[in-house]
Image (cartoon, rainbow, N blue to C red):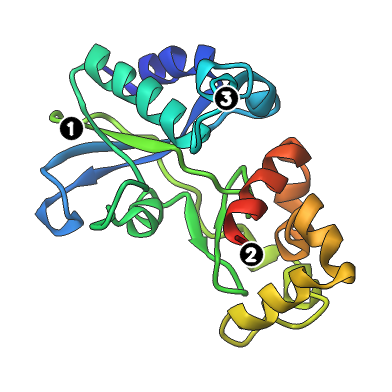
């Protein structure tokens, strides 16, 4: 088994490898190779919303779809599935994302990924018992050479150089002027130059915003 094979098996389901790392007991899981899976863009949202979990009228369609597909993939390749939902307790996916050396803390605190920017949506992970060969990581975070427009993109200063002001963010989303963030996505995430080239469907971003701002 290698990463190229896993990537080829995931692609028909509009999933891609977010990153992978060699896990130890310190990572809150068994030793092995942890492979994180995220949307393959462009095209993820049209694919997943045509699946049974989005057509049956039941809640949490995205999580139920992720569970079905990633569990199926894990069984096929002899791994164990893990998910960022379904807790508590919750698996430490933020730590795992950073362990891949392909996601870093951004200037505003949230993670930035080498190809997704701040449009990160990890759908799950598969832990394989063997130690797979991993490609070398990028030399550094893309933020080091970025003009960092994320620092000034929030219209109410909820996200910036200071800690995240969650109440200010939700209050803005409750007002008419917050409609652009609520339906089009967080302006800070959208300001990231890498996010702008990722190809995520705005409807997916609106979906995540609805769950965030319940």
Q: Is residue 160 left or right of residue 84?
A: right
In front: label 3 or label 1: 3
Counting residues from the N terminus, which is met first, the one under dot 1 or under dot 2? 1
Residue drawn at 74 percent across, 38 percent down: 203
- Pointer 2: residues within 10 angstroms few (<14), some, or many (20+)? some
Counting residues from the N terminus, which is met first, the one under dot 2 or under dot 3? 3
Q: Does the CB distance between marks 1 and 2 fall below 8 Å? A: no
Q: Position of residue 79 (x, y in %)?
A: 20, 25
Mark 2: secondary structure: helix
- Measured in 3D between alpha carbons, the distance from the residue under mark 1 to the one under mark 2, in whole angstroms, is 30 Å
Can you say whether 89 is above or below 122 in the image?
A: below
> Which of the numbered marks, if any, corresponds to residue 131?
1
Quarter where residue 82 is shown: top left
Q: Position of residue 50 (x, y in %)?
A: 63, 17
Residue drawn at 20 percent across, 55 percent down: 27
Q: Is residue 82 left or right of residue 193?
A: left
Residue drawn at 73 percent across, 65 percent down: 188
* Residue occupied by mark 2: 143
Q: Does the CB distance between marks 2 and 3 fall below 8 Å? A: no
* Residue occupied by mark 3: 54
- Measured in 3D between alpha carbons, the distance from the residue under mark 3 to the one under mark 1, in whole angstroms, is 36 Å
Residue 148 in view (yes/no): no
Quadrant showing the N terminus: top left
Quadrant showing the C terminus: bottom right
Quarter where residue 89 is shown: bottom left
Q: Is residue 186 left or right of residue 133?
A: right
Mark 3: secondary structure: helix
Q: How many numbered marks are there?
A: 3
């Amino acid at each position: 088994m290698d990463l190229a094979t896993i990537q080829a098996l995931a692609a028909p389901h509009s999933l891609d490898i977010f990153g992978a790392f060699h896990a130890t007991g310190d990572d809150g899981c068994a030793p092995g190779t942890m492979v994180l899976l995220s949307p393959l863009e462009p095209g993820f949202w049209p694919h997943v919303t045509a699946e049974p979990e989005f057509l049956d009228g039941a809640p949490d369609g995205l999580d139920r779809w992720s569970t079905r597909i990633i569990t199926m993939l894990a069984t096929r390749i002899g791994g164990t599935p893990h998910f960022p939902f379904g807790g508590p307790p919750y698996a430490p996916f933020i730590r795992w994302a950073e362990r891949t050396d392909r996601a870093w803390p951004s200037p505003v605190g949230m993670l930035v990924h080498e190809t997704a920017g701040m449009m990160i949506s990890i759908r799950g992970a598969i832990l394989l018992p063997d130690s797979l060969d991993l490609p070398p990581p990028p030399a550094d975070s893309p933020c080091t050479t970025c003009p960092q427009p994320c620092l000034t993109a929030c219209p109410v200063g909820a996200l910036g150089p200071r800690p995240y002001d969650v109440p200010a963010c939700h209050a803005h989303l409750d007002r008419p002027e917050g409609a652009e963030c609520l339906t089009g996505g967080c302006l800070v995430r959208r300001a990231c130059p890498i996010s702008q080239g990722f190809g995520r469907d705005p409807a997916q971003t609106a979906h995540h915003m609805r769950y965030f701002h319940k």
